[in-house]
Amino acid sequence: MKPREITLSTTPTPEEIAQLRLGDIVYLDGLMYTAREGVYMRALEDKANIPMELPSESAANFHCSPAAAIRPDGSFDLGAVTATASFRFAKWLPEWMAKTGAKLIVGKGGMSSKDYKEYFVPNGAVYLSTVGYGTGALLGRGVEKVEAVHWNHELGLAQAMWVIRCRKMGPFIVASDLEGNCLFERENEKISQNLAKVYAGTKPAVLKRFGETDDRSDELIG
Amino acid sequence: MISIDLIQKTAETLMDKAAVEIPDDYLQGLKAAAKTEDGDLSSFVLEAMLQNYEAAKQDNRAMCGDTGTPRWYVKMGNETQIEGGPIALEAALRRATANRTTGLPLRPNRVHPLWRTDHDNNVGIGAPEIEYGYEPGGEWIDLITVHKGGLFGTDYRMLFPSDGIQGIKRFYLDSLVAFGKRGLACQPAIIGIGLGGCKDTCMVLGKRAACLRTVGSKNSDPRIAELEDELKELGNSIGMGAMGFVGKNMVIDCNIEVGYCHTGGMQMSVHAFCLSSRRAVARVFADGRVEYRTDPDWFTDYQRRETVDWIPEPTPQEVTA
């Protein structure tokens, strides 16, 4: 069965978010900004003023650093775009969402269903995962224009806040819904049922390691 | 004498090729995997990746936004001389890395581990890594760049002879399952395994097995080659596919490299390359010829030599003949 394809605004209405189902394929229109540890620390810990009107300009936060450069004349050259793993940003996301009204968190690997239930669902937000990982060229084609780059002097190009105008940018996969369900946990549960068979005949290492789990259905993020 | 300008120019071309062009051996492996994949989501992902390679090539843009941590493997024939010597060579490779990071552009991933200082060009302390190998005879230099991702899919464990093959399988599965969940390892990938050596050499062997051997290559020891096939099949029987979705394809190929180790140990490392498998190779000759290819051909008989001298002792049959 082919997944359903949906085009979504980066300032979506509550109804548009409510219609999304786990596994839907999404293409984005509108402004999206990149923000990861550098931006979170500067905005939330150093209390710097966020240089955009959020969420009216954009409710879509991309966990990303593009393959991009700023030319000597100040213009931007943006090639490929892919996400970085989001679970590392759980520390800052609740405060970020409260402060910026982000409704679409776009990244790699998703978060836990606990994260979704605790602060995505109350904020009416969902998680979109990039595909692959590494459809960087396809996503790069969906960037109509780089509108601005903020904080590149303070944070470097990779951690700067890139503001990009998306035109049918995708594909992304819906990885959480407004009930707090998690696509990756659903898949992990199915896969775990087969693992005992795959491991049959192997044996634990003679020298153990601290913190080791032998329960392979464990989620390792968080 | 090999021209240093030609080395830098060639290195710059290789930086672009690695980032933009998917090596054909991996592409064919992924296409074959896509044919067998029947998980809905996994199939969608593999089809999207195949489109992505086309888009990258058409637009001359990097395949993936995370363009990894560029590094160099350099191999020389025994008679090779480089204009300006090894210092000039290293400067040329560093310059090529910086120029094409801003030129293509690539993502300037490399930062100071503590101060997070970013030179915005992938050059810094110890970056890019430059590793060397030599071959008997010849006046040529092989420049190999690999832009492997830097965060997930790699692990090391000190195993012992009593762990045996079953212990190797266990740690292999643990690594694939742990990093395969949510697709953190960017699978299906070429999986490299290092066995033996010391801890550092074990990591080096596994990484080179993943990055410097092609899909379809075999270890020259037939029993290791058998284990490679067995582990490939085992990895693909997990039931996990691209992005950690239900699927059949986790391993495009499994390559094992070994080194002699401490008699009490059996060091093991596992390295997952990725869906973009960025590697590019060129041989530069003293007469100015440059031959581009995608097979690093790193693991020659000489690299895997077992004896004190390279010219092996004659076999007993040869002596009696």
Image (cartoon, rainbow, N blue to C red):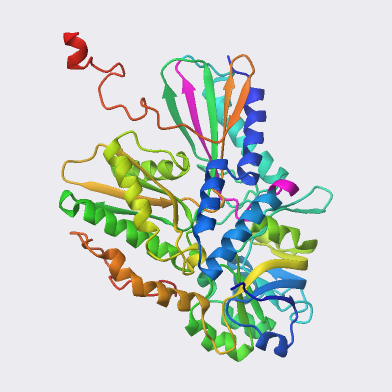
Region in magenta: B57-78
Q: Position of residue A137 (x, y in %)?
A: 68, 55
Q: Quadrant of residue B51?
A: bottom right
Is residue B197 visible in the rendered image? The answer is no
Residue at the image point whose x is 47% and y is 65% from the top: B247
Q: Nearer the viewer, residue A104 or B254?
A: B254
In this rendering, the answer to whether B13 lies above or below A123 is above
Q: Quadrant of the N terminus of chain A?
A: bottom right
Q: Position of residue B166 (x, y in %)?
A: 22, 56
Q: Quadrant of residue B302?
A: top left
Q: Nearer the viewer, residue A18 or B47?
A: B47
In this rendering, the answer to whether A55 lies above or below B102 is below
B44 lies left or right of A145:
left
Is residue A215 visible in the rendered image? The answer is yes
Residue at the image point whose x is 71% and y is 79% from the top: A59
A100 lies left or right of B241:
right
Residue at the image point whose x is 61% and y is 64% from the top: A83
Residue at the farthest top position? B321
Q: Is residue B77 magenta?
A: yes
Q: Nearer the viewer, residue B9 or A89?
A: B9
Q: Position of residue B139 (x, y in %)?
A: 52, 15
In this rendering, the answer to whether A201 lies above or below A186 is above
A145 lies left or right of A95:
right
Q: Is residue A219 magenta?
A: no
Q: Position of residue A186 (x, y in %)?
A: 47, 79
